[in-house]
Image (cartoon, grey):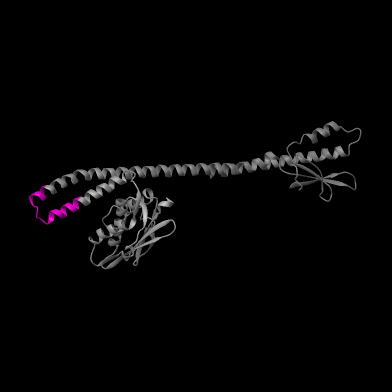
Amino acid sequence: MVIVAISVLFTNNLARALQAEEQKNMAVWADATQRLILADSNADIDFVSSIIEGNTTIPVYICDEEGKILASRNVPEGKETVGKHGPIEVKISDEVSQYIYWDDSHLLTRLRYVPYAQFALIFIFIVIAVITMLTAQRSEENRLWVGLSKETAHQLGTPISSLNAWQQLLAEAYPNDEYVPQMKRDIERLQMIADRFQKIGSEPALQPENLIPVIQNAVSYMRARSSSRIVIDDHCLEGVNRTVMLNAPLMQWVVENLLKNAVDAISGKGSITLQIHENERDVMLDITDTGKGIDNKNQRHIFEPGFTSKDRGWGLGLPLAKRIVEQYHGGKLLLKHSQPGVGTTFRIVIKKPEYR
């Protein structure tokens, strides 16, 4: 902006000086025209004509007293209006006068547009710089997510294998123990979590699947691990088929994450309601809770990595869920509505296969 401001000031000063110079030239040109019209046999016709012929840049109009154009020079063909500068009166006789008007020269006209051209170039440069910076930042974030996910999956792999071996030994030693099968389910759960992190670390494969069983599996998992005072209502999903392109384990993780946040937001008794909608292009899942809600000042930060309103938490759940929905599935995860003391609604939007 400083460069543009300095350029505008410099260019305007230069333009005013050039315009004043052109006005002086036109005064000389008008005087030469009058001398040529009134020339007698002793006049230096060649000198006067050279002055008139020397004007090759300034558009000039010679008009009568009624403003009708009698002659013109350096004027684009078809222009019927007189110039914006003037007039200079040229006496033809005591009773008759002609008037000279002129426009800015092509050089002066171009000079006035120089600041705008500079501003446009600087604006284009800024846009390119911002796009480059955002692209680099997004690429760095992608590398961070991939690295974090792969390293987490790698770190989980060894202890899970060890736990698997111990569980098999315990199952052989105590075949009737009721806790061994529960240990096996927990190890399988850990293995599934490791697999999910492994999928985030690479481009997951999508295939057409019914979204409803994926949601119901997440609901069943959270229902078994939440208080009996919290009702999870998914009746609207019964008997419904909504086929979309998805990676089932990752999408189930997203729904589980949203359900877990909803459970954490409810202190005491409350409810979580799931609703499925669709239009011509999209399938939409709304998850609504009757929890504490999100303050207005925090709503725009909830998808930022590291932001959390919980006493214990890393603030990675929602950013990771958003990444899975938007970057891997080409959909949208958004906060549809939230009001403190009333509750919150999150919406997942996934395009139908034919519109991907």
**Percent x, y for residue 21?**
72, 39
Q: Main secondary structure of the magenta part?
A: helix
Q: Which residue is drawn at 34% across and 61% down?
A: 240
- The answer to whether residue 228 is left or right of residue 101 is left
Q: Residue at x 32, y 58 (%)?
A: 212
Residue 213's image quarter?
A: bottom left
Q: Residue 327: in sight, yes or no?
A: yes
> Up-down: is 279 above or below 40?
below
- The answer to whether residue 127 is left or right of residue 263 is right
Residue 334's image quarter?
A: bottom left
Q: Residue 304: in sight, yes or no?
A: no
Which one is in front, 197 or 267?
A: 197
Tell me the magenta residue range. 169-187
**Percent x, y for residue 177?**
10, 55
> Up-down: is 68 above or below 274?
above
Which one is in front, 13 or 272?
A: 272
Which one is in front, 11 or 338?
A: 338
Q: Which residue is drawn at 30% across and 42% down?
A: 147
Question: Would you say residue 83 sits in the magenta stretch?
Answer: no
Question: Would you say residue 174 sits in the magenta stretch?
Answer: yes
**Percent x, y for residue 35?**
86, 38
- The answer to whether residue 167 is left or right of residue 135 is left
